[in-house]
Structure formats: C-alpha cells, structure tokens
C-alpha cells in the first residue's frame, strides 16, 4: 500500500501513479520534464502490465511490479504530501 498524495521535494511536483502500467526503458529526464503531468503525452511511453504501477514526478520515475519499499531508494525525494 502506498500514499496517493506523494510529492517530490526536488521538483515540487505531485507524484502521479498509474495502475497496471510500467514505463518504457527509453524514458529519460527530458521526457518527464516536458510532459508531466499531461496523461495524453505520457501514454506514449507507458506499457500495459497487469499488477504493476508506474510512478513519476517531473524529475524521477519508477516502475514497480513487486512489493518494494521506496524509502530505501536514496535518490528518490518523494514524501507524503499530507492528507
């Protein structure tokens, strides 16, 4: 289970999450910088994968397909945006 109000302290963007998708390996910083948070543009690099979840802000992204503790990934600056 994850917070659905994550916010990135590096770019100050809300972290978007997409159920049953992963990011294409060709994704890069500029893709997210130029296309967040417009879903219609992001879909170009989303791959359908049942049970997975794609996360992204304007400066970082992750595809998760198994139970993962995101707090252990030091390069992510995602925190609860408070409910």
Image: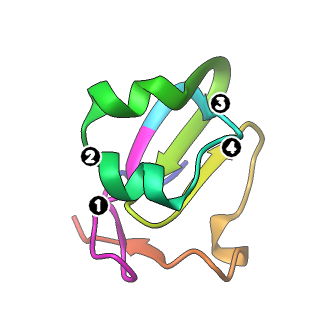
Could you tell me which secondary element the residue under label 1 belongs to? loop
Provide the residue designation for mark 2: 37
In space, the residues marked 4 and 2 are separated at their CA atoms by: 19 Å
Provide the residue designation for mark 1: 14
Provide the residue designation for mark 3: 52
Q: Is residue 12 above or below residue 63?
A: below
Give left or right: position of 1 versus 41. right
Instruction: Categorize mark 2 by other alpha carbons within 10 Å: few (<14), some (14-19), many (20+).
Output: some
Mark 2 or 3, nearer chain start? 2
Residue 53 sits in quarter: top right
Label ID, residue 78: none
Provide the residue designation for mark 4: 64
Contact flag, marks 3 and 4 (Cβ < 8 Å): yes
- Was residue 13 drawn as part of the magenta stretch in this picture? yes
Q: Which secondary structure dominates the residues rendered in magenta? A: loop
Is label 2 or label 1 in front? 2
Q: In this view, does 68 lie above or below 10?
A: above
Instruction: Categorize mark 1 by other alpha carbons within 10 Å: few (<14), some (14-19), many (20+).
Output: many
In space, the residues marked 4 and 1 are separated at their CA atoms by: 18 Å
Q: In which quarter of the image is the C terminus?
A: bottom left
Residue shown at the point (46%, 57%) measured from the top left: 30
| Magenta residues (range) | 5-17
Residue 47 sits in quarter: top right
Contact flag, marks 4 and 1 (Cβ < 8 Å): no
């Amino acid at each position: 289970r994850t917070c659905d109000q994550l916010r990135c302290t590096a770019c100050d963007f809300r972290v978007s999450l997409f159920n049953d998708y992963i990011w294409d390996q060709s994704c890069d910083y500029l893709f997210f910088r130029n296309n967040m948070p417009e879903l219609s543009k992001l879909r170009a690099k989303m791959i359908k994968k049942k049970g997975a979840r794609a996360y992204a802000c304007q400066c970082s992204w992750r595809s998760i397909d198994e139970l993962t503790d995101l707090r252990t990934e030091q390069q992510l600056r995602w925190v609860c945006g408070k409910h």
